[in-house]
Amino acid sequence: MSTEDNYLRIGGDLRVMRVGYGAMKLTGDQVWGPYPDHDQALAVLRGAVDAGVQLIDTADVYGPHTNELLIREALHPYPSDLVIATKGGFVRGGYEYDTLGAVGNVNYLRQSAHMSAQRLGVEAIDLYYLHSGTATDAPFEDQVGALADLRNEGVIRNVGLSNVTIEQLRVAREIVPIAAVTALFNVTVRIGVELRAAAEKADIVFSPWHPVTITDGPLASRAAEVVPSIATAHGATVQQIALAWQLQGSTHSLPIPGTTSIGHLRQNLEARSITLTNTEMKALDKIAIS
């Protein structure tokens, strides 16, 4: 990759390095409550920025709220080139994951965006995602319309969509410019593959979450037969190969790996310097072909 290949623009104006940081892991068990080692959490966030990370991804439901507050404590006032992305539209009723639900109520979404801005300490949120396309209590068009209104009002700068269908992306783009989409996509889980293709066609950012996972998912056994040998050939970790595959697989890809280790964070960034051969890329792609 060239130097410029290591960067993307979100919404046309926010230039960021192509490996961001997903902050979800800096919460308690099951993404509930604060991270138990507060000082370590602060150190990881500050270490990410010191290492050159320019996009930090969070959500109001992480904690809930504790993740956004942690980011503010660690990094505010923010560097001028740092982009904070957050999301709204999920609620948690307690520690158990089965209490998680999607809410599309327009006033709730508006409140969520305003409160996220307050917790993060910003006048305008750089990138604000609708966290899910699955809410049924309001029409999807109304939910996107609420984010469009917030954009017009200056509460958010760019609108993103998380975990939506191709059709929902099409509908949303008729309402407001969409700067980025995010979905589950990695070597062993290819759920977001169609959304990635749609993002490329629309010239918007695709931000895969859990981007370096190689041990979970329906393709894990096949990945175990392919990835380690490629990693050995490059003197790299299997996670670095998984990340390099993301970066080379799409010029619109902006993965957001999460970690609680500064050492692992730096390894993730080093994956940008790995160039996989065409043969290696095809081998990794074919993991998904039965």
Image (cartoon, rainbow, N blue to C red):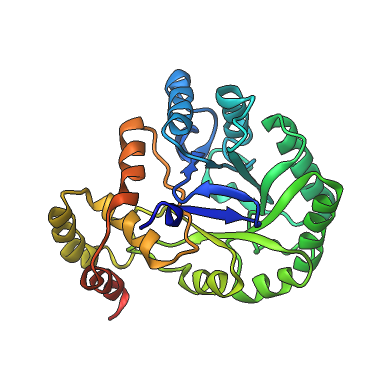
Q: Residue at x 50, y 63 (%)?
A: 252
- Quick one: which residue is furthest to the bottom in this view? 290
Question: Percent x, y for residue 97?
Answer: 52, 47
On the picture, is 105 further left or further right than 214?
right
* On-image quarter of the C terminus: bottom left
Q: Is residue 41 above or below residue 247?
A: above
On the picture, is 150 further left or further right than 251?
right
On the picture, is 146 further left or further right than 68?
right
On the picture, is 226 further left or further right than 175?
left
Depth order, front residue of 54/134: 54
Q: Residue at x 65, y 63 (%)?
A: 133
Q: Residue at x 18, y 65 (%)?
A: 226
Depth order, front residue of 273/39: 273
Q: Is residue 9 above or below residue 198?
A: above
* On-image quarter of the N terminus: bottom left
Question: Percent x, y for residue 31?
Answer: 51, 39
Q: Is residue 209 above or below residue 54?
A: below
Depth order, front residue of 113/266: 266
Depth order, front residue of 176/289: 176
Q: Residue at x 48, y 30 (%)?
A: 45
Residue 92 lies in what quarter of the image?
top right
Question: Percent x, y for residue 254?
Answer: 48, 55
